[in-house]
Image (cartoon, rainbow, N blue to C red):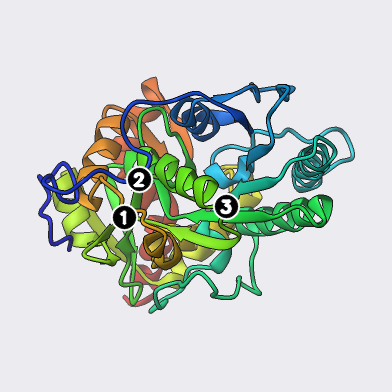
């Protein structure tokens, strides 16, 4: 549980703000390229020019770039596949073009924003350091992200670059599969999962990217809520209590098996492997950013409050949102838990009679 308590609004109200916090100054030398709310928040928070959604523009004089990989938001794919082209291939192509344009425009430094999910989530997962290897078994969004990162690196060639890999990003307008997990009336847990939640408010992500730009940092940097230099995490019981949700625990084989079947028939938008990111830990250290002077201003508890305000009144299952009569029916059935395993539990119970 966070040491700051569930009502704390900031990590340390009496401390100085994170580097880069305060009034936004225009950065005509920086362009943010990407789709979605995370890209918009970075564009606004950095005072960057150009890079609007759709076909980004590259303003004259921009010598540094922030490339936001769409799948890094863990939302419904922003990049739609064309006939005969997979969503991943389309994403990789967009990442490659962004990298090539940055190089052609004479970019002196590029920051790529993806997700720490590329390192994988698993029972008992140790804290992820900046130099930790990526997951060899990456699938779903994690594999999309890795492929996009590789495409950008190849396109940039000798251009100095950094990759910022955040934990679960939350904030106004942030709508992702991970945040939609909290739209279900019950919080799904897996036996032996020991899920702890590390969140990152989008304002602190902006501050992290600003530090990377100002210090011209290179390489991989993880970012997540921290307190006193250590990851600021919330256990599932605390999260459920604050959210006013019940927890339901299922065997891993039941949860993942149900998710796979539902994905196969199109009921869930993501493969079963993506379920790991909501039932297993993937906490990051953010060591290099802290060494560079970054200090997030939002505690994990305060970020959770923002997330809960964002999803209040919505009903979603496994990343798919429902409304009207669908929402009422799903709420009565127990929403995500009903979808992800109730039938299997019933079958097991009958088999023991």
Q: Provide residue 159's location: percent of width, then percent of height.
A: 76, 52
Q: Of residues 253 and 35, which is closer to you in this image?
A: 35
Q: Is residue 280 above or below residue 149?
A: below
Please, what secondary structure does the residue beneath circle 3 have?
Answer: loop
Residue at 57% over, 52% down: 216
Q: Is residue 317 above or below residue 167?
A: above
* Quarter residue 19 falls in: top left
Q: CA distance from mark 2 to mark 3?
A: 14 Å
Q: Residues within 10 Å of mark 1 (few under 14, many from 20)?
A: many
Left/right of residue 29 with respect to residue 89 in the rendered view: left
- Which circle marks residue 71 in the picture? none
Q: Provide residue 309's location: percent of width, then percent of height.
A: 25, 31
* Quarter residue 81 falls in: top right
Q: Earlier in the sequence, mark 2 or mark 1?
A: 2
Task: Determine which residue is flagged by label 2.
Answer: 19
Q: Of residues 105 and 282, which is closer to you in this image?
A: 105
The quadrant the C terminus occupies is bottom left
Task: Determine which residue is flagged by label 3.
Answer: 216
Q: Residue furthest right?
A: 84
Q: Nearer the viewer, mark 2 or mark 1?
A: 2
Q: Earlier in the sequence, mark 2 or mark 3?
A: 2
Left/right of residue 230 with respect to residue 134 in the rendered view: left
Can the viewer see residue 18 in this picture? yes
């Amino acid at each position: 549980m966070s040491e700051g308590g569930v009502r704390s609004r900031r990590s340390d109200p009496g401390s100085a703000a994170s580097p880069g916090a305060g009034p936004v100054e225009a950065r005509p030398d920086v362009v943010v390229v990407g789709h979605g709310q995370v890209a918009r928040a970075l564009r606004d928070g950095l005072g960057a020019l150009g890079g609007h959604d759709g076909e980004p523009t590259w303003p004259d004089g921009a010598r540094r770039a922030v490339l936001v990989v769409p799948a890094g938001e863990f939302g419904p794919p922003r990049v739609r596949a064309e006939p005969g082209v997979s969503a991943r291939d389309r994403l990789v192509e967009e990442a490659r073009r962004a990298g090539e344009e940055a190089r052609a425009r004479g970019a002196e430094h590029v920051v790529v924003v993806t997700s720490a999910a590329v390192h994988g989530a698993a029972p008992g997962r140790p804290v992820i350091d900046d130099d930790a290897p990526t997951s060899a078994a990456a699938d779903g969004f994690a594999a999309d992200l890795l492929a996009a990162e590789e495409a950008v690196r190849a396109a940039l060639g000798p251009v100095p670059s950094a990759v910022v890999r955040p934990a679960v990003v939350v904030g106004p307008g942030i709508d992702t599969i991970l945040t939609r997990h909290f739209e279900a009336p019950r919080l799904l847990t897996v036996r032996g999962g020991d899920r702890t939640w590390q969140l990152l408010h989008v304002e602190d992500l902006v501050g992290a990217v600003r530090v990377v730009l100002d210090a011209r940092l290179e390489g991989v940097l993880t970012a997540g809520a921290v307190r006193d230099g250590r990851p600021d995490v919330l256990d599932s019981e605390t999260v459920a209590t604050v959210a006013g949700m019940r927890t339901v625990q299922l065997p891993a084989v039941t949860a993942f098996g149900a998710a796979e079947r539902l994905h196969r028939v199109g009921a869930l938008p993501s493969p079963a492997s993506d379920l790991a990111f909501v039932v297993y830990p993937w906490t990051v250290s953010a060591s290099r950013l802290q060494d560079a002077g970054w200090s997030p201003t939002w505690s994990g508890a305060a970020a959770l409050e923002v997330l809960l305000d964002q999803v209040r009144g919505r009903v979603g299952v496994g990343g798919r949102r429902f409304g009207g009569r669908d929402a009422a029916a799903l709420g009565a059935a127990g929403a995500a838990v009903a979808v992800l395993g109730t039938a299997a539990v019933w079958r097991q119970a009958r088999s023991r009679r």
